Amino acid sequence: MAHSTPLRIGMAGYAFMGAAHSHAWRTAPRFFDLPLIPELTALAGRNADATAAAAAKLGWSSTESDWRRLIEQDDIDLIDICTPGDTHAEIAIAALEAGKHVLCEKPLANTVEEAERMAAAARTAATRGVYAMCGYSYRRTPALALAKRMVDGGRLGTIRHVRAQYLQDWLSDENAPMTWRLDKSRSGSGALGDIGAHIIDAAQWITGSKISGVSALMETFVRERPLAGDLVGLGGHGNLDAGSPRGAVTVDDAAIFTARFDDGPVGVFEATRYALGRRNAMRLEINGSEGSLAFDFEDNNVLSFYDAAEGPDAGFRRIIVTEPEHPYAGNWWPTGHGLGYEHGFTHQVVDLVTALAAGRQPEPSFGDALQVQHVLAAVEASGGNASRWQEIRQPEP
Ligand code: SOE
């Protein structure tokens, strides 16, 4: 059945994440039968010319130079936050108080205190039928959604080990420019919050188990980088030379930690942007009493599965996650014609819009994202204190 009720979107930010979200809002209703049809109503950014250029390229109908104007507009139903972390709390809380649904990029905030205020605002808004969701988009990668389905279905038995890595290499060159992602006041943390947050969320979501304590090691390899005018985005405008003025890197370049989960499993996590040759290797391996699963985003259409019931000759076998029965896959291409990075964002829109139309809380909620924020804070506390074990207090749901 074709639906025509609009969901009018106002989005703040238009860089890498803004482009991914714009594509998702546009594409979702073309491949999925959505109960509400997203309209790309207004895009906000501080630089008027750059915002106008982005709006034209990404398909937005109008622009604003201040996100507050989005919130004042009656013809906007949902605020999508794609700006750096230091702005998330203010925008999200104002939007929720004004009765607008919110989709907020991860990590939820730069501090636990901000995340707590956001989760409280979301709880209050939900009592009025206004909902907030955090953009842990990898949950919507079909292979990871299938991994969750298999774990939930008992295919792995009792979970014992989680091995999670998120490896990138875009900072390996010490003359790669300073970006907002390297400035703690804007990003909250470095590799830890930017990419470590994804594997924390994915590991907890798939196992259905929360991290209850951590012991961490953190390192910043390059402490100053060339400035490139306004702090640029991921990778920036190419490398500057060694003689350019330099700014201080105030975040971790690598974060490694061991973890206990609340009902038994133990975990090893590693996040770095210095793993040369690993461009976006978001990897997860889970070992249970009956089998194991392994995933690497660099081969994102594949989930590897070891089933101990298959006997002594069982090896890991590759499931190509493109069958119509697999999560999300049936709405796309014929079997074997795989999906990419952008599809996670499109599926995120599908799940969000479906939940909103049904009047139910979309996941991950701000409460779920607050819990991830507690893990990030515990890793930082332990990493800054000779790897001392840090217990994690679970926030109220
Ligand atoms: C940059 O490191 C980044 O874009 C993250 O911010 C995203 O969340 C991740 O999906 C890819 O890497």
Image (spheres, helix red, strand yellow):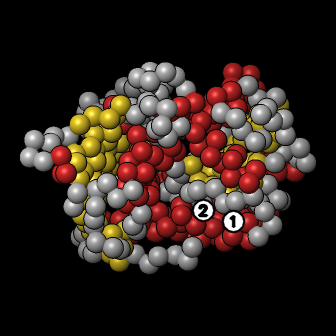
Q: Is residue 46 left or right of residue 289?
A: right
Up/down of 99 relative to 81, above or below: below
Q: Secondary structure at mark 1?
A: helix
Q: Nearer the viewer, residue 182 or 105?
A: 105
Quadrant of res 317: top left
Disc 2 marks which amino acid? Phe
- Kindly identify which residue carries mark 2: 366
Quarter containing the C terminus: bottom right
Q: Position of residue 148 (x, y in %)?
A: 41, 52
Up/down of 353 relative to 3, above or below: below
Q: Position of residue 327 (x, y in %)?
A: 49, 40
Among numbered discs 2 and 1, the one appearing first in the sequence: 1
Task: Please say whether residue 48 is visible from this viewpoint.
Answer: no
Give the residue furthest to the left.
Answer: 312
Q: Residue at x 70, y 59 (%)?
A: 360
- Kindly identify which residue carries mark 1: 122
Give the residue furthest to the right.
Answer: 74
Q: Position of residue 373 (x, y in %)?
A: 48, 64
Contact between marks 2 and 1 (CB within 8 A): the answer is: yes
Quadrant of res 289: bottom left
Q: Residue at x 47, y 63 (%)?
A: 372
Q: Residue at x 65, y 33 (%)?
A: 32
Q: Nearer the viewer, residue 331 or 13?
A: 331
Looking at the rendered structure, which numbered label has been put on residue 48? none
Mark 2 nearby-residue class (10 Å; few <14, some 14–19, many ≥20): many
Task: Please say whether residue 331 is visible from this viewpoint.
Answer: yes
Disc 1 marks which amino acid? Ala
